[in-house]
Image: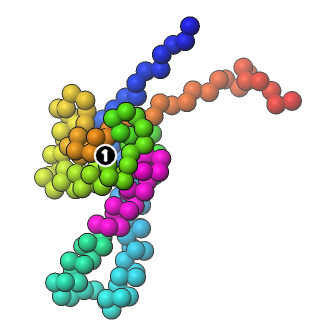
Amino acid sequence: MTTPIPAPETAGLLRRLAAIVYDVMVFIAVLLLATIPFVLVAGGAPTNRGGQLAYQFYVLLIGFLFFGWFWVHGGQTLGMRAWRLRLVDRTGTAITWRQALLHFLGAILSWAVFGAGYLWILVDRDRLSWHDRLSGTRVIVIPKIRRAPAASRPSAT
């Protein structure tokens, strides 16, 4: 008789925010490097309105490619890995690039209204944010792997 594996727990707000802090630090470093070619092409800081809009679009594109790549390829950013979180679709499988785009744009909206989309996790019966609902995804907690004590492990000899 086998014991059924319980469904993964949906991540709460504090754990998600902790992962976001990690990810923001990594993303700032990526953005600093990604800005170098833009500054070289623009000949310095953009001063006209068109240059500013182009740069803002460029930052959004870099952000989507950065987060989207991690989400589509393994479901975890570096911060999510540190906090044992994974972004999956509603069935628990890897997300698509379309879902990654909806999740990314929805997260921007969630922050734009003073974090209300994230705070929604506190009242949602399924602990989903606005962007989780929009993209058909959820953030799950990866259970810790319990290792057997050293005395009970088989020897390598």
Q: Where on the picture, by quarter, is residue 91?
A: top left
Answer whether residue 77 is magenta in the image: no
Q: Residue furthest left?
A: 113
The kind of residue tagged 1 is Leu
- What colour scheme was applied to this rendering of the protein? rainbow
Magenta-drawn stretch contains 72: yes
Residue 35, x across and y down, in percent: 37, 77
User: Front-most of 110 and 2?
Assistant: 2
**Where in the figure is residue 116, as x and y percent of width and height?**
15, 46
Q: Nearer the viewer, residue 8 or 94?
A: 94
Say which quarter of the image contains residue 27.
bottom left
Q: Is residue 109 left or right of residue 76?
A: left
Please state the extent of the stretch shown in magenta in the rendering: 60-76
Magenta: main secondary structure equals helix
Q: Is residue 44 left or right of residue 109?
A: right
Which residue is at 65% across, 23% downward? 148
Binning the other alpha carbons within 10 Å of mark 1 as few (below 14), some (14 to 19) or many (20 upward) gives: some
Going 33% across and 92% down the picture, which residue do you hit? 43
Q: Which residue is mark 1?
A: 17
Looking at the image, residue 4 lies above or below residue 95: above
Horizontal and vertical percent for residue 114? 14, 52
Up/down of 20 relative to 5, above or below = below
Q: Give the farthest residue toward the top.
A: 1
Which corner quadrant of the image does residue 30 belong to? bottom left
Residue visible at 38% across and 56% down in the picture = 67
The image position of residue 47, as x and y in percent, is 20, 88
Q: Is residue 147 above or below residue 139?
A: above
Query: Looking at the rendering, in which quadrant would you find the C terminus?
Result: top right
Q: Residue at x 35, y 58 (%)?
A: 24
Q: Is residue 11 visible?
A: no
The kind of secondary structure element at disc 1 is helix
